[in-house]
Amino acid sequence: MEFIDEDDIEKADPKVVHADDVPLVDLSEVDEVHPTVSIRPVDEVLDLGEMAAKLWYFEPGEEVGFHAHPEEEELYYVIEGEFSLKLGDAEDPEYVTVGPGTFFAAGPYEPHGHRCVGDEDGVVLALGAPADAGDDVIDPHDLS
């Protein structure tokens, strides 16, 4: 799913871009997307074809709900803020609280989600491959 209109993208050349130069997209204005957080679609500006790369911006209480992907492997890195992670089996998930400098990952069919907790905004770098696999989302309760 493209988040920036192709005509509005200024592709980085060479493939170097500062985060502030990537347009901020409010996902609450995108009907097909459930999270209402904001993102910077770095992958679109850098014209990546094989990997998704997004900066996710959270206010306290905002979250990416518990979900899984049938094909995508995702790697997350917490840049700012504190997050409560919900990981694993839908019937008995594990909860872990993490802060800046923490990596977490989810492979295909591995349920995961995260919520910004505490009083400060949060920023997470999300990388996923293959690039278009993140569009397919599974309810973890359907996996049992």
Image: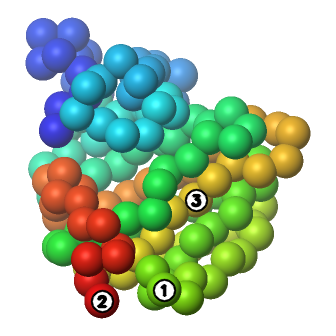
Q: Residues within 10 Å of mark 3 (few under 14, many from 20)?
A: many
Q: Is residue 22 visible?
A: no
Amino acid type, residue under disc 3 in the picture: His
Tag 1 residue = 91
Tag 2 residue = 144
For marks 2 and 3, give the CA distance. 21 Å
Tag 3 residue = 114
Quadrant holding the C terminus: bottom left
33, 107: nearer the viewer: 33
Q: Position of residue 29 (x, y in %)?
A: 35, 18
Is residue 30 depicted above or below 46 in this figure?
above
Q: Position of residue 87 (x, y in %)?
A: 53, 78
Dot 2 falls on a residue whose secondary structure is loop
Colouring chosen for the image of the structure: rainbow
Q: Nearer the viewer, mark 3 or mark 1?
A: 1
Label drawn at residue 77: none
Amino acid type, residue under disc 2 in the picture: Ser
Question: Is there a contact, CB below 8 Å, between mark 2 and mark 3?
Answer: no
Amino acid type, residue under disc 1 in the picture: Glu
For marks 2 and 1, give the CA distance. 8 Å
User: Sequence order check: which comes first, mark 2 or mark 3?
Assistant: 3
62, 76: nearer the viewer: 62
Q: Residues within 10 Å of mark 1 (few under 14, many from 20)?
A: few
Is residue 46 depicted above or below 66 in this figure?
above
Dot 1 falls on a residue whose secondary structure is loop
Question: Is there a contact, CB below 8 Å, between mark 2 and mark 1?
Answer: yes
